[in-house]
Amino acid sequence: MKKLIALFACVLPMCAAFGDNPPPQPRVSIFSTTTDWSALTGLPLRQFVGNFDWDNSDVKQGLVLYYLDAFPCYGEADSVRIWLGPNSKSEGKLRLVCVHSPKSISFAWRNATRDADQAQSKGILTCPVSGEYELKIDISKCTIGPEWKEYR
């Protein structure tokens, strides 16, 4: 009987602590799921470089972009973070490997200064792309999608 009372003494406070909220979820490690598009499509992979065009009003104190992999392209590991700042200053290079030139690409984005630490982004920024191997991305033509909290 004492063991049963001790068990309830431990379990009941835990139930009350969670209330209507679910228990915290463990962090999940994400590993690359990059597919060999060349093998699947029979099309050769080629390297593409993104070149950005922007005005100071588009970026304010700075805009950090993280390329979101999507067919027909995936980002090269060291080249998917780009900072765009005022006065045409930038840091980072967008290099993609694609089976053909994309018509649009998407980024996770946030406003930040050049040396800001990595932090949570706002949501998705989708940008039209022109050009072949030298991709042209005009930030003023990009569309801001919903914030992350609005995705379900």
Image: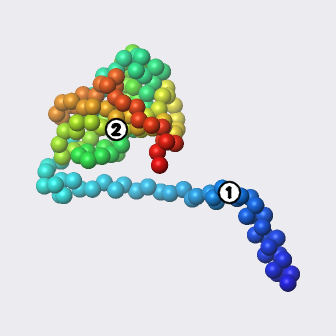
**Residue at the limit of the structure toward the right, as seen here:** 2
Image-quadrant location for residue 34: bottom left
Q: Nearer the viewer, mark 2 or mark 1?
A: 1
Q: Residue at x 40, y 16 (%)?
A: 56
Q: Position of residue 8 (x, y in %)?
A: 80, 73
Instruction: For mark 1, give the secondary structure.
Output: loop
The residue at 45%/37% (across/down) is 146
Determine the CA span between mark 2 and mark 1.
Answer: 36 Å
Which amino acid type is shown beneath numbered disc 2? Ser
Q: Which residue is mark 2?
A: 106
Tell me where residue 63 appears, x and y as whole percent.
43, 27
Q: Quadrant of the N terminus?
A: bottom right
Assess disc 2: are there few (<14), some (14-19) or many (≥20) residues with their C-alpha within 10 Å of its C-alpha. Answer: many
Q: Is residue 116 left or right of residue 97?
A: right
* Label 1 sits on residue: 20
Label 1 neighbour load within 10 Å: few <14, some 14-19, many 20+: few
**Within the image, what quadrant is residue 140 found in?**
top left
The colour scheme applied to this rendered structure is rainbow
Report the disc number at residue 124. none
Tell me whether circle 2 and circle 1 mark residues in contact (CB < 8 Å). no
x and y percent of residue 104 in the render? Answer: 27, 36
* Residue at x-position 79% and y-position 75%: 7
Q: Earlier in the sequence, mark 2 or mark 1?
A: 1
